[in-house]
Every structure is written in structure tokens, then in C-alpha cells.
Image (cartoon, coloured by chain):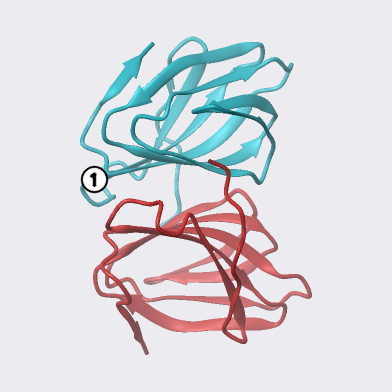
Chain colours: A red, B cyan
Amino acid sequence: MKAEISKAIDRGNYIKYPLFERELPEGSYAQIVEIKPKSRVGKHYHKFQYELFYIISGEAKLGIGNEEYHAKPGDIYLVKPGDVHWVENNSEESFKLLVVKLNFRGEDTVWL
Amino acid sequence: MKAEISKAIDRGNYIKYPLFERELPEGSYAQIVEIKPKSRVGKHYHKFQYELFYIISGEAKLGIGNEEYHAKPGDIYLVKPGDVHWVENNSEESFKLLVVKLNFRGEDTVWL
């Protein structure tokens, strides 16, 4: 089946578009995340879930653990449980990425 | 961590580039798959694994179950266990996609 965006969850600084809700196996979750221009997602980590990022469009500073990346379309990143991560989009364009969560047991975000 | 392509597994008609080997949690697997120009991957299905596809570049005919798609960059697809699927790249360009396997218990492909 092909993904169809049917829902947008606006969190102010970013918008989440869930994918294949009720279709994916237990322990996984997928969404597109769009971080708005001149917006950031603050430092946080997850207790259990892994996050796989595929950068779709835009550019942003992406911090994962002690590393800071200049993230660009086509880049792929992995965030492991406990890895503190953050995004800073200083551009005039949205920063869009596919996020696939693995070992997902529900909301487990810890904001710093 | 950022993905680095360190290995290419050439299957003749396509090439697989595993991602984050030994880094992902049990039950998952990630790779980039490049289907060569004028090449196809024949009908097959998986017994247990789900496959999430993000199309990176190129265009191809993609069959999933009874549906046939003209797959293009940015498209996202889900293949569920038992869904017969195939790819036909009739173009002069490679067809590249990110494949994330969920509920992955090892090789479980059945070729038709």
C-alpha cells in the first residue's frame, strides 16, 4: 500500500504526519516530521525507542549525542535510546524528514 | 550517528547496501537497495517481515498485492507479510530506495 497523509499534528514548532497507522507491527511507528522555518526542537532523548531519520528536504543543524551534523537531503541518521538529540532549523525553508521508530513502546520522550 | 555505506552486496539485478549493521534493535533491518537500469526484481513475498519503502531516486513499476504503482522519489510504501511484490525498472537510471524491515526474524523470502 502507498502512504497517504491523512492527519497533521501541529506542535507549533513542528508538524507530525503519521504514516500507516494501525498497519505497522507492534514495536514500530512511522511519521514524516516537518520542522518549520526558523524553528527548533529542543534537547530530548527516548528511553526505549530507536529513531531512524531519512532527510527529505531542507537543511538543519542536527545534534545527536556529542556530534553536531549539518543535515541535508539524502542523509540517514540513527538515534539510539538515551542519545540526547535536537534540531535547529535556521533557514527560511521547512526541514522535512521521515522518522521510523523501532523498539517503540509508546511515548517515552524525556525533555531536558 | 550518521549512516555510512561500508558494504555493497551485488545480486546482479540489484545492489544492497546494509545500514547500521549491529546497531539496530532486534526485529529490524535497514538497507538501501539499488535496482539497476533495465532490471527487475521478481515476484516474492515475506513470511514475517514488513517492508517500508522510501523511494530515493529513479522511477519504476512497483507491484504490491493487486496494486501496480508508478513509483517516484518521495513515495512511501508498506509491504505486509504475505503481500506479493515486485519491481520493474524499465528506465536507463537506477531505482534507489530505502528499505526498513520490521518484525524481521531473518531471511524469510519466498520467491514465486
B42 to A19, vertically: above or below: above
A15 on left or right of B102: right
**B47 and B75: which is toward the camera:** B47
The amino acid on which the numbered mark 1 sits, given as a three-letter code, is Gly
Task: Please name the residue shown 59% across and 82% down the image.
Answer: A40
- Splitting the image into 4 quarters, where does residue A107 fall? bottom left
Could you say which is closer to the camera, residue A11 or residue A60?
A: A11
Position of A66 relative to A31 (above/below): below
Q: Residue at x 71, y 70 (%)?
A: A94
Q: Position of residue A70 (x, y in %)?
A: 60, 64
Q: Is residue B90 above or below residue A47?
A: above
Q: Residue at x 40, y 29 (%)?
A: B7
- Foreground residue, A42 or A68? A42
Q: Secondary structure at mark 1?
A: loop
Residue A81: image location, x then y, percent: 27, 68
Q: Which residue is mark 1?
A: B27
**Residue depicted at x 24% and y 68%:** A48
In x, y percent, where is residue A99?
A: 48, 60
Disc 1 crowd, CA 10 A, few/some/many (<14, 14-19, 20+): some
Q: In the displayed structure, does residue A8 sit left or right of residue B101?
A: right
Q: Is residue B75 visible?
A: yes
Q: Residue A83 is drawn in which quadrant? A: bottom left
- Number of numbered discs on residues: 1
Q: Residue furthest bottom?
A: A112
Q: Percent position (x, y) of residue B30?
A: 39, 41
